[in-house]
């Protein structure tokens, strides 16, 4: 930056110095100031420090709350919410981090949320934007986000008053991609950390999507549609259904999902974030402690009552396996045919 400014000075002095030194210095001064403001703006957006909190009171640190021990670069992510509807009482100085889980349907986010909510210091409020009226405009989205992060959201999972991390899960097709620019700005201004949760094996995800869609009508468990289950018996009942995949659109369907994933990573690249894969939570015992470290909450073992539905190899779960196999074989998705996220 400094070099650029020096260059400009040199250019100016060689051209203008002979005419009027007074005017020249004024112009130079103006130029340096304008350039400085520009550089500041650029670096602010890159460093993602909130330049202007939209609501001062929301971000305000209680005078009595100590921020000792919090590294300066972390301060933007630390909050002391002051809900209007109740008092946080003895927890009012417990610092709270904001997070969001950005994911896609049938990628393990429901399970992941129950794991997070088994932690005493985390509150994740579910799929808040599944309701259309909450995502119809950026205003309704922002109002909803403000309520969640001010610890005023009412949900069965809400622990509110005494927690250290608050968030919710948000599917990419629930207006995230539509308002991505404003949402990424909001996240940067409010210091919201993003957890991307994706499934590596998009073919398995497709099987789960189709089976879940089928159960919406079939209601295999005692006439009730279940997206998530808590016993092996229920899981096996749901897994009995073998979907037939449309092979004419299969490759396009897989690449559409993949494209959405990469695009969302691009949209939120300026935000503090981590990328997590469903398969890694299953296979890598350290994946969950990485999440807890990312959220700056004490590392401990997480538990969920949910039971995985599709635990068999893919060829046992797809009705038209032969066609699916020959369609995907040799394509860029060939590895989906062989990778296993099931427990053998
Ligand atoms: C986590 O929750 C426990 C139990 O409510 C509490 O004693 C502890 O202080 C909390 N820790 C943090 C970091 O908030
Ligand atoms: C179905 O309902 C019966 C009777 O209410 C109950 O005993 C059984 O556990 C239920 N089955 C499942 C799979 O939920
Ligand atoms: C399968 O995909 C093709 C191409 O997208 C589409 O035209 C057709 O309607 C689909 N078939 C079914 C049964 O959905």
Image (spheres, rainbow, N blue to C red):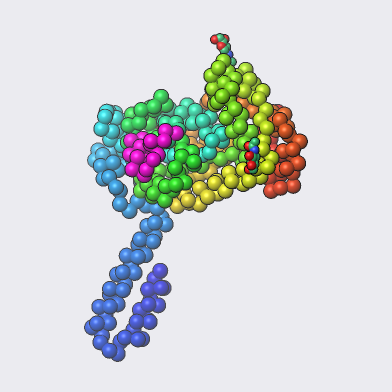
Q: Residue at x 28, y 38 (%)?
A: 65
Q: Quick check: can you spot residue 56? A: yes
Residue drawn at x 76%, y 36% is: 322
318 on left or right of 300: right
The question of residue 227 being in magenta is answered with: no
Nearer to the camera, 270 or 206:
206
Q: Report the span colored magenta.
A: 130-149
- The picture quadrant where one finds residue 126 is top left
Is residue 38 placed above or below 18 in the rendered structure?
Answer: above
Query: Residue sitting at 32 percent across and 65 percent down?
Result: 37
Q: Position of residue 286 (x, y in %)?
A: 57, 36
Quarter of the view holding residue 36: bottom left
Task: Say whether residue 133 is magenta.
Answer: yes
Residue 3, by quadrant, is bottom left
Return the x and y of residue 42 as percentages of the image width and height.
39, 61
Q: Is residue 319 above or below residue 77?
A: above
**Residue 272 seen from this side:** no
* Quadrant of ligand 2 in image: top right
Q: Residue furthest bottom?
A: 18
Q: Label the magenta part by its dominant secondary structure.
A: helix
């Amino acid at each position: 930056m400094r070099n650029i400014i020096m260059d400009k000075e040199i250019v100016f002095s060689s051209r203008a110095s002979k005419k009027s030194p007074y005017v020249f210095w004024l112009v130079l001064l103006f130029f340096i100031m304008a350039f400085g403001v520009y550089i500041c703006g650029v670096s602010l957006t890159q460093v993602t420090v909130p330049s202007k909190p939209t609501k001062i009171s929301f971000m305000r640190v209680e005078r009595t709350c100590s921020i000792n021990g919090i590294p300066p670069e972390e301060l933007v992510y630390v909050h002391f919410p002051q809900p209007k509807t109740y008092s946080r009482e003895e927890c009012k100085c417990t610092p709270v981090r904001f997070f969001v889980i950005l994911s896609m349907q049938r990628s393990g986010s429901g399970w992941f949320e129950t794991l997070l909510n088994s932690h005493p210091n985390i509150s994740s409020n579910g799929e808040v934007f599944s309701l259309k009226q909450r995502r119809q405009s950026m205003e309704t989205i922002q109002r909803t986000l403000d309520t969640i992060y001010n610890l005023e959201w009412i949900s069965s999972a809400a622990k509110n008053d005494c927690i250290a991390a608050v968030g919710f899960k948000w599917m990419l097709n629930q207006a995230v991609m539509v308002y991505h620019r404003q949402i990424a700005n909001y996240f940067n201004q409010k210091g919201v950390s993003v957890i991307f949760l994706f499934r590596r094996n998009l073919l398995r995800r497709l099987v789960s999507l189709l089976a879940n869609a089928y159960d919406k009508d079939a209601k295999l468990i005692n006439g009730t549609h279940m997206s998530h289950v808590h016993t092996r018996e229920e899981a096996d009942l749901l897994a009995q259904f073998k979907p037939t995949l449309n092979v004419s659109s299969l490759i396009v369907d897989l690449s559409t999902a993949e494209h959405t994933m990469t695009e969302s990573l691009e949209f939120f690249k300026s935000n503090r974030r981590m990328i997590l894969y469903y398969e890694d939570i299953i296979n890598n015992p350290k994946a969950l402690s990485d999440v807890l470290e990312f959220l700056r909450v004490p590392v401990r073992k997480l538990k969920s009552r949910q039971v995985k539905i599709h635990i068999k190899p893919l060829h046992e779960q797809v009705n038209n396996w032969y066609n699916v196999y020959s369609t995907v074989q040799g394509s860029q998705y060939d590895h989906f045919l062989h990778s296993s996220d099931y427990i053998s």
